[in-house]
Image (spheres, rainbow, N blue to C red):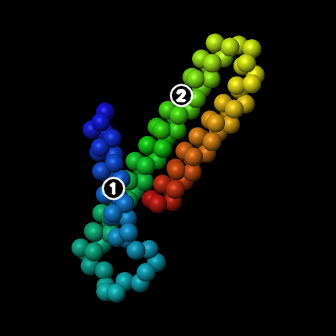
Amino acid sequence: MRTVWQVAVLALAVAAVAAPAVAHGEPASAPATDEAKANDSWAGSIRTLGACLGAALAVMGGSYGIARIGGACIEAMARQPEAARDMFAPMVVTAGMVEVGMLFTILVCWLIS
């Protein structure tokens, strides 16, 4: 499992370095050659791969966070059933904050790609 995280972090680091290589909206100083087009295509592919990996990590982290929140709340409700009504609202608010963070990260990854 540790190797998977290392590969994901390495891919994101490569994407972060390669992303500025593709300049959007700037006029080219020289006519584009086939090699320059291939390099732009490669950098765009790496950027897209990094954005997809970032979105996947956001979904995995958000899902894990919401599962932990729900599991802890259910366990607490099982231990103190009389406090179930008081625990439900904070659980929903906390899960909503995790969900919003996850969706914002996915949006940023989508805009990057």
Q: Is residue 63 above or below residue 21?
A: above
Tell me if residue 45 can be seen.
Answer: no
Tell me if residue 60 can be seen.
Answer: yes
Callout 1: 10 Å neighbours few (<14), some, many (20+)?
some
Relative placement, left or right, of 34 versus 27 is left
Query: What amino acid does circle 1 point to?
Result: Ala
Q: Secondary structure at mark 1?
A: helix
Residue at far bottom of view: 29
Relative placement, left or right, of 1 versus 108 is left
Numbered label attached to residue 95: none
Q: Secondary structure at mark 2?
A: helix
- Which residue is painted at 66% across and 17% down in the image? 77
Residue 20 quadrant: bottom left
Q: Nearer the viewer, residue 77 or 8?
A: 77
Query: What amino acid does circle 2 point to?
Result: Arg
* Percent x, y of residue 78: 64, 13
* Percent x, y of residue 44: 36, 63
Q: Nearer the viewer, residue 105 or 69?
A: 69
Residue 94 quadrant: top right
* Percent x, y of residue 12: 36, 53
Q: Is residue 51 above or below residue 87?
A: below
| C-alpha distance separating marks 1 and 2 | 28 Å
Q: Is residue 26 above or below residue 51?
A: below
- Which residue is painted at 31% across and 86% down in the image? 30
Numbered label attached to residue 68: 2
- Which residue is painted at 30% across and 50% down in the image? 10
Residue under label 1: 13
Number of on-image labels: 2
In the rendered view of the protein, which quadrant contains the C terminus? bottom left
Q: Earlier in the sequence, mark 1 or mark 2?
A: 1
Q: Nearer the viewer, residue 27 or 76?
A: 76
* Percent x, y of residue 55: 46, 47
